[in-house]
Amino acid sequence: MALNRPLFEQRLASLESVPNLRALAISALAALLEAPDDWRCLRINPLRVAEENGLPVDEVLDVFLHAARLGLLDLRFNLVCPGCGGVEYQMERIDAVPSGEWLCVVCDRLLQAELDDRVEVSFTPELGVRHLALDASSSLQHYLSFYFTANFERSAELKAFLASVTVALELVPPGQETLVKLEARAGQTYRLLSVDTHSQVVLAPAREGHGVTEVDAVALPEGLRPGHVSIASGPVRVRVANRRSVTVGVMAIEVDRERLIDVVTRFPSRMRPFLTAKMLLNNQTFRDLFRVQALDADLQLRLRSLTLLFTDLKGSTELYDRTGDLRAYRFVRDHFRVLTDAVKRNHGAIIKTMGDAIMASFNEPTDATRAALEMMRGMDSLSAGLKAEGHDTGLKVGLHEGSALAVTSEERLDYFGQTVNVAARVQGLAQAGEIWLTTPVMDTPGVKPLLEAGGWRGEQHEVSLKGVGGKTRVYRLQR
């Protein structure tokens, strides 16, 4: 362990001085950063820290995000394959995440870098605070720990399958060679792959017996070469020369896609809960602390599911005319506080404000629905006095769930797509004191019990929304 004690204590003190952070969560982080095992500090999962210490996830995440802002931790975005748990790429910025497909060389398949569950957000000690002396080449276990996420728990059946098809697994130091021996069966394809170089050599059975029995493979800075070799059946010797400046891991496996699909279908592995990029983007603390970022203007990242909430405040213009600027301003300001508190308490984030309206995002429709109900309760209390004086004010809310793109707009992270358009149009249907939502939200398990418990009843409508083809089924909710 190489802990810079003075710098660690200085930045820890700065973290402790931040108002409203949970002391127990800070202590849990400090204990982790002081732990002697460097491997424990590789890709720290704040959700696991919360679980191990019996703390609320939101409180632990707030501490980790402030720690990253203060230079105690570094934030990392890792592309994780849901099939094998391989960490194919690690990035320091979200706009470095690829917007298109990427290859998992272990599973030999192309994947979309969707923010829902394929981009793992982790934390590592800031280099100046603690240097992690991690040598992935020191052992097979360390190699696997470095290139595969600790959040992926393989089923026993998958472990047995992988053991049965793995011919060899070698670590090749820079400038050295290793020999992999195969007893190639007729018609059987093999793969020589390297997770750390994101590349492979396909050893395919030759046609008409013209295959080779000696293969020379080389690990170059751009990956393993050659890409494809035709081999003969029987004994095959593969020499792997490492021409890189670091140790390279190579794995030789038999290709058996049919049995692999059967195993993963019948005996699925488990991914332990982890902080996803989607969860991070919908976190208010992250939005507040990292508001000013030099993001790529062409950022376009996919989300399979996002719940959006739009609001508008009825009667605010008339309120300025009838009560004067000062009282109306205070009311509008307090109304924003009610909305912001409801969003943050329910694991959401305010994306932007537009006059007296807000756009907020949530990971789940249940969180958004709960926030909408809290907003309505808060507004009841806030506007009671004004209504008693005859002022007609009220909140209008619309919700929708669907796929979206995370983009850069006016130097901030925003969302784009038809889901955004539908959510905004649905809110436009609402009158003061009403919540309107779409079928994907209403049909989410847990939403209807929330509405019933709050005394809300739904009335179904088929409506035409501007810019949306066909009819849209919506629900008008009233108390």
Image (cartoon, rainbow, N blue to C red):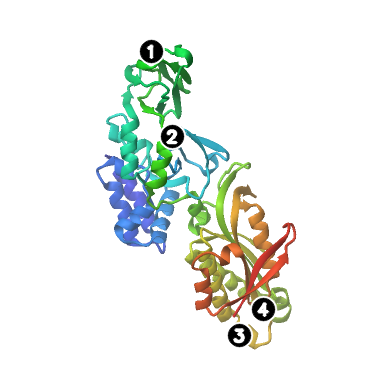
* Residue with the mark numbered 2: 257
On screen, 142 above or below 16? above
Instruction: Measuring from the top left, give residue 426's x and y in whole percent.
Output: 67, 65
Q: Tell me if 212 is positioned left or right of 54 in this view.
A: right
Q: Which sits in the foreground, 474 or 350?
A: 474
The residue at 45%/30% (across/down) is 198
Q: Which mark is residue 213?
A: 1
Q: Marks 2 and 1, how far apart in space?
A: 24 Å
Q: Marks 3 and 2, how far apart in space?
A: 68 Å
Q: Rate crowding at label 3 as few (under 14), some (14 to 19) or many (20 or more) other CA atoms within 10 Å.
A: few
* Residue with the mark numbered 3: 385
Q: Amino acid at mark 1?
A: Thr
Q: Amino acid at mark 4?
A: Thr
Q: Earlier in the sequence, mark 3 or mark 2?
A: 2
Residue contact between numbered discs 2 and 1, judged by CB atoms under 8 Å = no
Q: Earlier in the sequence, mark 1 or mark 3?
A: 1
Q: Earlier in the sequence, mark 2 or mark 1?
A: 1
* Residue with the mark numbered 4: 393
